[in-house]
Amino acid sequence: MLSSMNTKSMVGVAWLISMAIAFWFGSLRERPRLEEEPSILGDVVQKATPYASGESGRESSDSSLSFAAEEPELSATRAKEYDFDREDSYDRASDSRSWNERLQSTTNPMERMSVLMDAFRSMDASNVDEVVAAFKENTEPNRRFSELNLLINAWAEFDPKGAVEWADKLGGWEERSAIGAALERWAQIDLEASMAWSNEKYKGRDNPYLVGIIGGLAKTDPDRASTLMQEMPYGRNRGRAASMLLNNYWKSGETQATDWAEGLQDGSVKDYVTSQLAEKIAREDIGRSAQWVESLSDGRSKNRAVGTVAYQWARKDPAATAQWVDGLGDTDSRFSGMEGLVKVWVDRDAAATAEWLNQYDPSAGKDGAVEIFVNAIKRKDPASAMQWAESMIDEDEREETVAEVARIWRRGDPEAYKTWQQSRESAEE
């Protein structure tokens, strides 16, 4: 009986060993398939970054062997499905579908953008209608602005007039943006033709279409662009044109930008450009910006630039800004600097701002900074605001500011206001 049990035990052990061996062989057979299932991303990464040596290199080599060792039918199917020698996921040259069909068949944003860029690059007089139709059919709201500009720039390369006239029918912000982009390119290709179109389209002096033309001309003939900009009447359009020119000069270098700004005729354009340039420099180096504005000739442009630098500097260090403003001397530019500083400082520390302002005697130049201070505190502390308002020198400004503080005080705390009013009337008697 014992012999019989030993025999059965031996058979059981043998069966367990055979099952373990079978499982082990099975895992060896299946492992390459599980690990080496081909994927577009994985194989592209392997091709782009080949292994030099080591464990990863051996895995890559084993992968190619296991792929080749698979069943011929399956291997051929995968080779057809994933052609790793192709640069793109589809053969663009042999794709006979329309651009609309290609865009509609895309499955992810990257593929869609790739197809759209192909359409714009291939755009010419023979297929412009097809590309435009595909754009209109497939564009999405969150991408429309950037894609519209790409379309217009591609179109304007070979037919700027056609691009402008199509953009002119869009309406709203799309019309303004697209026309500006088309005119910018048209001005580089044929300035006279673009000018003729804009003058025909708008008969007044404040021609909004000149903004795009000046933007394009700034890249080819900045001096002429600057002359055109200065001939425009005061207004938002001239400001936009001046900003475009400033950005163009800034790209050429800080020295080119400062030379251009300093060479402009005195007036509101120069004031605006100088202030904007001071801000650009301040964002990179506040000390350098301060030195530049100090070097400018006295006048409105310098005053405005000093105020801009003080405002930017105060956002980082109000106390240091106050020291700089103190060192500017008894000039109009110092009062502009005071205004720029107070705009920031009063919201952070009204008490420190008041203490600093008290160092200066009342004056017409100081009135601007005092008014800014009063407007900032009049709702929180109307009593203090009223004291500051009454210290202003300019009579008209003082009475207007006092009346505004009184109106707010009367609504917020009528009893305290009434007490102040009675004391003021007694003092006047």
Image (cartoon, rainbow, N blue to C red):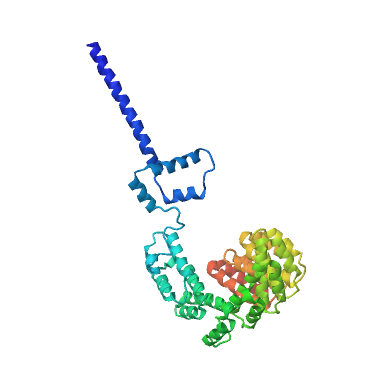
The N terminus: image quadrant: top left
Residue 152: horizontal and vertical position, in percent? 49, 74
Residue 356 drawn at (x, y percent): 71, 62
Q: Residue 352 at what x, y percent from top left?
A: 67, 59
Residue situated in front as seen by the camera: 383 or 254 = 254
Camera sees residue 144: no
Q: Nearer the viewer, residue 74 or 319?
A: 74
Residue extending farthest front: 72
**Figure quadrant of residue 288:** bottom right
Please tell me whether residue 69 is drawn above or below residue 333 in the rendered image.
Answer: above
The residue sitting at the left extreme is: 1
Viewer-nearest residue: 143 or 267 = 143
Horizontally, is 383 left or right of 74 in the view? right
Which residue lies at the image location 61% right of the left edge and 71% below the top edge?
422
Q: Is residue 101 left or right of residue 262?
A: left
> Which image quarter: residue 66?
top left
Q: Is residue 348 left or right of residue 7?
A: right
Can residue 105 be seen in the rendering of this structure?
yes
Q: Position of residue 344 (x, y in %)?
A: 63, 63
The mark tally for this picture is 0
Quadrant location of the C terminus in the rendered image: bottom right
Q: Is residue 353 above or below residue 53?
A: below
